[in-house]
Image (cartoon, rainbow, N blue to C red):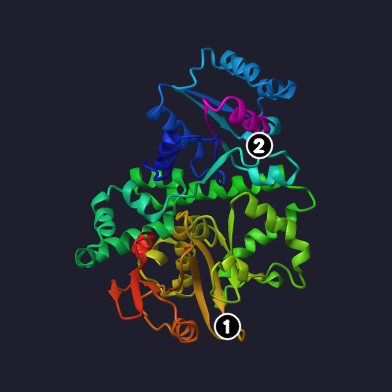
Amino acid sequence: MYRTAIELLYKWKDKKGRKPLIIRGARQVGKTWLMKEFGAKAYKKCVYISFDNNQRMQELFAADLNIERIVTGLELYAGHKIDSAETLLIFDEIQEVPKALTSLKYFNENAPQYNIVCAGSLLGVALHQGTSFPVGKVEFIDLYPLSFQEFMLAMGKEQYIKLLDGSDYSMVTTFRQEYIDLLKQYYYVGGMPEVVYNFSANKDFSEAREIQGRILDAYEQDFSKHAPHDVVPRIRMLWNSIPSQLTKENKKFIYGLIKEGARAKEYEMALLWLTDCGLVHMVNRVTAPSLPLKAYEDLKAFKLFLLDVGLLSCMVRLRQDVLLDRNELFKEFKGALTEQYVLQQLKTHKNISTYYWTNDRNSAEVDFLIDNGEVVIPLEVKAEVNLQAKSLKTFREKFNPKISLRTSMADYKKEDWLINLPLYAIGTIDKV
């Protein structure tokens, strides 16, 4: 499968003064595959080292951080000479050997000629446990599940993507049903690479659910294996409460829904653990839509989303027939699934930050506010073709934004103050 993130890796390779690169992301979003694919395509040789349960690497990095000695050790481990110009060094699960993480500083300062790409699924967790981090000596990219556009590509629909990228909305509208059918499949299958790969080959919805179930089980095992024992029950309760939190009309996260009488202080560590692992995305409320939005964050009010729409539909046991046949039983959850989908696509855009807004009385809410560094854009999310946007109108009357966006199942339409962007075209939001 093609991942757009590989283009960022090519840019990194060609950049002057590049630093060791760390790919951040949750487990099973495809970090290892991406690094190996990049190594195979862009270099003559590739040395892959997983630090997970690797006693030799523990010992190699434990002695001292002399780069010449470390490279000699890596050559002995690989069984061949490492040519710095033509070899990619891949350090996987680097958080398992904290001194290997620290060594990136010395590679950057003393041996910048080496091409080093690293990944760590629980990197954020490791850092909160006091691991020394080479601040300013590394670069980062974030990897998420496949976007809807990547999913379409995996399904062999490259021409459909070209139509969207070219903003040919008259032609897009002609083929709207094909886009909608693909979007419904994506709501069910999601973007976890193993699930998409399997579904693209077999078109088997039941098999997709089985793989998603295994991924969710693996995450639960991670809770027990890596989190502090006293926090594990709270992590589980918080994690399992997310679908019901998103089903509410007001999707603000409420601790009382986890357990009656629950307070924020009790669940701080659980929430931090899940965000550090990349398993949840927190979207904070802002009190005013002014740049930069981060300066107006209300840290006590936030919405919580999962990393993947397919995993969300699996957690609630959403049936294939309910989703694909427009079953009314699905109505209440449709808004939650749609908002999860939109947030997931927004996260793949590196240069935008995402928040949401409510007025002081909570009588009006704009689902997302987007900050691209130059302007604040309100974005209203509609699950169907119902185009009433009362909250967006309230927001516009109060703040008069330059541009307002609504995304729904309706066709593309540009009015004097509002653009309706079809849900299946939300990946092109940067062009808007």
Q: Is residue 102 magenta?
A: yes
Q: Earlier in the sequence, mark 1 or mark 2?
A: 2
Q: Which residue is mark 1?
A: 359
The amino acid on which the numbered mark 2 sits, given as a three-letter code, is Gln
- In the drawing, does residue 53 fall left or right of residue 2? right
Residue at image point 64% right, 49% down: 220
Picture coordinates of residue 150, whole percent (x, y): 37, 50
Instruction: Choose mark 1 or mark 2, whichever is in front.
Output: 1
Cα separation between marks 1 and 2: 42 Å
Look at the image and give the residue range highlighted in magenta.
100-118
Q: Is residue 52 visible?
A: no
Question: Is the N terminus in the top left, top right, bottom left or bottom right quadrant?
Answer: top left
Residue at image point 57% right, 75% down: 248
Q: Is residue 281 visible?
A: yes
Label 1 crowd (10 A; few <14 / some 14-19 / many >=20): some
The amino acid on which the numbered mark 1 sits, given as a three-letter code, is Asn
- In the drawing, does residue 159 fall left or right of residue 211? left
Q: Name the image quarter holding residue 280.
A: bottom right
Q: Name the image quarter holding residue 165.
A: bottom left
Picture coordinates of residue 267, whole percent (x, y): 74, 61
Label 2 crowd (10 A; few <14 / some 14-19 / many >=20): many
Q: Which residue is mark 2?
A: 95
Residue 269 numbered mark, or none: none
**Direction right: furthest residue:** 230
